[in-house]
Image (cartoon, rainbow, N blue to C red):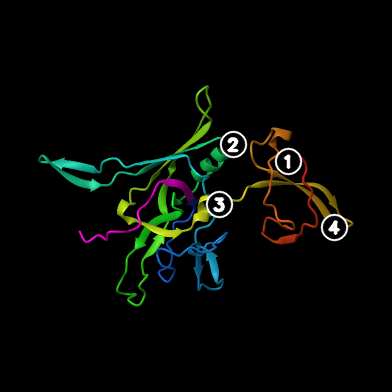
Amino acid sequence: MGLPDCTLVPERIVRFMFTPSLRAMPANGSPTVLPYADLWPDPVWALETGLTPSPTVQLWPHLWGLITPYLEDVQSERPEAITEEVGGTPFFVRYANRRMVFTTVRKPAEFGRLMAQLRCQKQVGVFIVDAEGRVWGERADAYTPDNPDNEFAERVKPIAVQPSTINERFIFASDTTVPKYEVSFELTREFKDYELVPVWEGADILSYQPPIAVLTQVQDNDTINLEAKVALFARFAQGVRAQNIVPITTLSPAPTAYDANNTALGTVSSLMHLGNG
């Protein structure tokens, strides 16, 4: 069938990267497969360039925050296509939805809450990360005669997820099992398996740690010296007081505080770690 002897194929799925955007990467963007580079935290394939008024905008927002941990088990199945039988002959109607199911062990309750929030989005897209550190997405459109000078006219986009099918289920531990979350979701019926294409690759994505959401609480507001003491709490299992302390090891020595309008309020002058957090 004219297939090459050696080509990229998806390996075992180990992570998912979610985003509330289904936009396609521009045709004047990078080629389908990019060489490895230091792309953290804003990979070039997640940015649009050459736009006005801003030179770069986030193409797939929250992509680097909505990435799952390294998954212990991922299952994917697609039922037989929907057909109609007429006169004893079956006729193809459409593909059935592909269902993804993954399991991750010993995760806090917050993980289930974050997955449940995706169900409230109007649209959800997902990129698949395999065991080789390769990211897979969906081909958006092919080479077209109206852009003959661009050999990389193909575009890529996240694989569309049916938000209403996202389901998270916590499984308690027993004498012979560990506590774990089982999460399932379905891809939309428009996704075709042969549209799966590699987008980016790099081993760092296998160990990448996404940002941890924190709750800020003002402890003391000094209006004379214009200083404020702010406590940071990791938003995990809220309500258990001292047992809720989670170490924050990647906090910058001089972080900047922002208000709700994303306006910088000033730089933190000193940090003090209380307990283990």
Which residue is denoted by mark 4 in the rendering? 226
- Residue of label 2: 108
Per the image, label 3 sits on a secondary structure element best described as loop
> Secondary structure beneath disc 2?
loop
Gap in Å between the C-alphas at discs 1 and 4?
28 Å
The CA span between labels 2 and 4 is 38 Å
Above-or-below relation of 121 to 257: above
Measured Cα–Cα span from mark 1 to mark 3 = 22 Å
Q: Amino acid at mark 1?
A: Asn
Sequence-wise, the earlier of marks 1 and 4 is: 4
Dividing the picture into quarters, in which one does residue 111 lie? top right
Classified by dominant secondary structure, the portion drawn in magenta counts as loop
Residue situated in front as seen by the camera: 175 or 231? 175
Furthest toward the front, the residue is: 5
Q: Residues within 10 Å of mark 2 (few under 14, many from 20)?
A: some
The 10 Å Cα crowd at callout 4, few under 14, some 14 to 19, many 20 or more, is few
Task: Please state the extent of the stretch shown in magenta in the rendering.
Answer: 1-17
| Three-letter code, disc 2 | Pro
**Residue identified by numbered label 3:** 208
Q: Is residue 217 above or below residue 141?
A: above
* Camera-nearest residue between 42 and 261: 42
Question: Residues at badges 1 and 3 in contact (C-beta under 8 Å)?
Answer: no
- Quadrant location of residue 266? bottom right
> Quarter of the image containing the N terminus?
bottom left
Closer to the N terminus: mark 1 or mark 2?
Answer: 2
Left or right: residue 273 compared with residue 73: right
Which percent across, then down, holds residue 166? Answer: 45, 41
Three-letter residue code for mark 4: Leu
Residue 276 badge = 1
